[in-house]
Amino acid sequence: MSTRRRHAAYGLVLGAAMVASACSTDSGTDATVSTPPPSTTPEVITASQAPAEPPFVERVQVVQLPSGTSVQVYPTASGRAAQGAGDNATAWAEVLADDPGADTPGMRAQFDCHWTFARIVAPDKPSWNLEPWRPVVSAQQMIDDRCNPGGAEE
């Protein structure tokens, strides 16, 4: 065995012996593994917000504009803050309770778009205007048209 290999072998044996001695106690029993000290990082506490409660719609107003009929939906503060899974359906039911004629696929799609995006993009917008004359379009087209397919917002 070459001198270099012999030194490497001794180094390995010596290293193993040092590790073994560090892991035992004077009494000959195995040492216990200590737990790390508790973290000094303070726990972050966030305030939880109570879920939004209905009513989500203050009122629904049907108006005649030069472009045609517009159903103006005025959300409540709770409606603007709502994030629950069924809150959208509850709010739509409130719209239909005030104006059953709004129950069309195009009007529902406009409402869903406003519910999902207008609350984020324009949180202080007084009303969400739904027009029955607007065409039914794909979800992507609805987004591209900023919830107002077929013409500018009234």
Image (tube, rainbow, N blue to C red):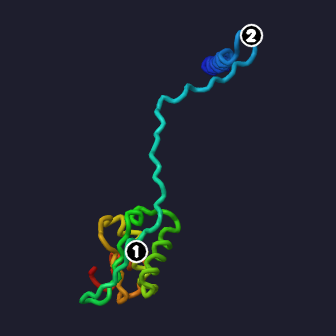
Viewer-proximal residue among 100 and 128: 100
Give the residue pinned by disc 2. Answer: 27
Residue 59 lies, in percent from the top left, at 37, 75
Which mark is first along the chain, 1 or 2? 2
Element on which disc 1 rests: helix
Assess disc 2: are there few (<14), some (14-19) or many (≥20) residues with their C-alpha within 10 Å of its C-alpha: few
Amino acid type, label 2: Ser
Whether residue 2 is visible, yes or no, is no
Residue 125 lies, in percent from the top left, at 30, 69
Name which residue lies at 48% across and 58% down. Answer: 51
Which residue is situated farthest in the top direction here?
26
Give the residue pinned by disc 1. Answer: 113
Quadrant holding the N terminus: top right
Which residue is situated farthest in the left direction here?
66
Viewer-proximal residue among 14 and 96: 96
Q: Which mark is residue 48?
A: none
Amino acid type, label 1: Cys
Residue 6 drawn above or below residue 42: above
Whether residue 117 is visible, yes or no, is yes
Viewer-proximal residue among 3 and 72: 72
Quadrant holding the C terminus: bottom left
Name which residue lies at 58% across and 26% down. Answer: 36
Name which residue lies at 38% across and 67% down. Answer: 76
Residue 2 drawn above or below residue 87: above
Residue 2 lies, in percent from the top left, at 64, 20
